[in-house]
Image (spheres, coloured by chain):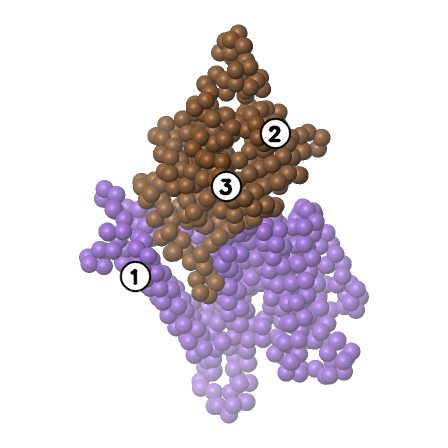
Chain colours: A brown, B purple
Amino acid sequence: MSVSDRPEPTDATSSRVPLVEMRDIRVSFGGVHAVDGVSVDLYPGEVVGLVGGNGAGKSTLIQTLSGAHPADSGQIRIGGEDVVISNPRDARIHGIEAIYQTLALADNIDAAGNVFLGRELLTRSGSLDDSAMASATQRVMQRLNPRFKNLKTAVKSLSGGQRQSVAIARAVHFNAKILIMDEPTAALGPAETGQVRELITQLKAEGVGIFLISHDIHDVFDLADRISVMLQGKLVGTVNKSDVTKDEVLAMIIMGKQPGQASVEEIAELHG
Amino acid sequence: MTENAATATAVPKAPSERPSWRTALTSAELDTRLLGTVGAIAVIWIGFHIWSGGDFLTARNLWNLSVQSTSIAIMATGMVLIIVSRNIDLSVGSLLGFLGYVMAMVQTQWIPKTFDLGYDRWYTWIVALAVGLVLGALCGLLQGFLVAYGKIPAFIVTLGGFLVWRGLIFRFKKGQTLTPMDKTFKLLGGGPKGSLGDWKSWLLGGLACAAIVGGIVFARRRRQRYELAVRATWIDATLATVGCVVVLAAVLVANRYYWPPNLATQYAQDHGITEPAGGLKISTGIAYPVVILIGVTLIITYLARRRRFGRYVYAIGGNPPAAELGGINTRRIIMFTFMLMGVLCAVSAAVQTARLDSAVTNLGVQNELDVISAAVIGGTSFSGGVGTIPGAVLGAVIMQSLRSGMVLLNFDSPTQDIVVGIVLVAAVGLDSMLNRRRAS
């Protein structure tokens, strides 16, 4: 699929520069092509849902952007400029923050310590400025999860939703321009899921670009502007949410069929 | 209470329950595990005191206990960081032996004989110590490099170190005993002359009290400035009082241990003092090795709790991938923990050789087991991410209390090993049982 075939983002004019352009990204493990020549992009204030079955390569693709696992080949442009992202520090320099499926928190450290992990605030003498970090965390939390009070306890004793708040607080505090959310609601109950959805809407309004990875098609349909579908390491296609039905996206995910290509019988079969 | 106004505005209090010990302890943010260790020491001390018919809690025995605990305690502070970051160092006993031997070579062979500069020069102890510290850092760095960058398990690297460092001792003078140590160097090991004496001990105690009070006030101000919750005033006041009382009691005990009569008589003659009836009573005070241990504990605690390095050590132990994703250079941090361990082995080696006034080939044998036990009894967890420096120091005191108490009771050495072994396993078993109960 060539670049020109790709649908333009809903409310973006062609003159707008994408926040992120990933071109022809390839990652292989041993002989397996986990990501095989995938190209996606992301505009400011946009949510792009990245969907696909288990092992479709969506997490691996996104790890090349977050620096957790550098790409073997391909190009990444941030704000129109070529960049090299070989570790999480590089990603952060470009305003990329990631919230991982596995919640990358140090369980034995408190909320503030986790929010600032790797980017601690220091006093003039170079010691950790715990009070300043706790205070900043408290401020971010007031916005994310006002009931959050356990600033001083190790995050292992927090609930799934509170832990997720800590992970998100990290991204919010450092003013991420590009946010990667890998299954952000997988560990959460309904109320907490609602909170995360609200937050995504809020960040979007502030112009943050969000890659939302999920295997829950309903989540993606509610939140995303565009949907990129992956199957067996390849991009099946990217569609505007408003142009497609859930069934059509399901057909892309499962059979790799473009919208309109799947027959009525095949769609019926999806619903088994 | 007007002082509590800040507390009340900063955190809306939970519906007030009847104040219990548990809530008081929680709001004091005290480490309950650490308190448990202190409690265990109290039980052991009082138990031995009764069993030995009043011989344990004497100034003399406690002073000796303080000196005997230092070598293991110094190394245990570094071992905490190693175990917290999910590694292990089995080489510390051998490395201590090797470094002690090298420092002894500097004083007894290389400076006086090889360079023909004579004995007991003003710089001898400094050179010996510096050589030991630098060599310790290099040995640790090498092991840390192999673990962090060579990706060889720490168990294997330091098991190799365990054999290599011990073996290297025999490359010098075929492993003969080296003695005596430099006059000044010897003071590092304690003894009547290697101690602070009366007024300097009080001065140190006074400074410690000022630091305790100042630290609590400073932390309080800082939290208030950021409008964070502060502890109730009475809790801070109690903590400060308890801290100061403990410090001053320790100084009092150390000062109640007097020089041996023959040394005191010698001193009286040298200074033209006529001895009063019953002999001259000269306070020994806090021993230099204990002063060194206090310094090491403060420095390592500061590194562990207030510096990025320590924060990263704990983050790596808590969740290694999270630390990596946080952009932490985990390998460099791991390498540095081993280097620090090497430096601490050198400090302990200096204390032990100075105290023995000689270097022998079996110096530090089995120390790795005592050091690891001290860290673990003090609350360091092998699953990583958990452990405190003061806990490990108290763990070392527990180990030494058991040994010295059993010596008082004339237990033979194999029996001592059996008891210490059982205590170690029981302590860890109890700890993990309590943890499970706390979690559920």
User: Gap between marks 2 and 1, in whole Å?
Assistant: 72 Å
Q: Which quadrant would residue B246 be assigned to in this image?
A: bottom left
Q: Give the percent coordinates (x, y) of residue A78.
A: 54, 44
Q: Residue at x 33, y 57 (%)?
A: B226
Q: Tell me the crowding category of disc 3: few under 14, some 14 to 19, or many 20 or more residues within 10 angstroms, Cα based.
A: some
Picture layout, residue A68 above or below residue B189: above
Q: Residue at x 55, y 49 (%)?
A: A89
The chain holding disc 2 is A
Label 3 sits on residue: A17
Q: Residue at x 36, y 52 (%)?
A: A135
Label 1 sits on residue: B237
> In the orientation shown, which residue stands out farthest toward the left?
B1
The chain holding disc 1 is B
Q: Residue at x 53, y 40 (%)?
A: A20
> In the orientation shown, which residue stands out farthest toward the top?
A265
Q: Tell me the crowding category of disc 2: few under 14, some 14 to 19, or many 20 or more residues within 10 angstroms, Cα based.
A: few
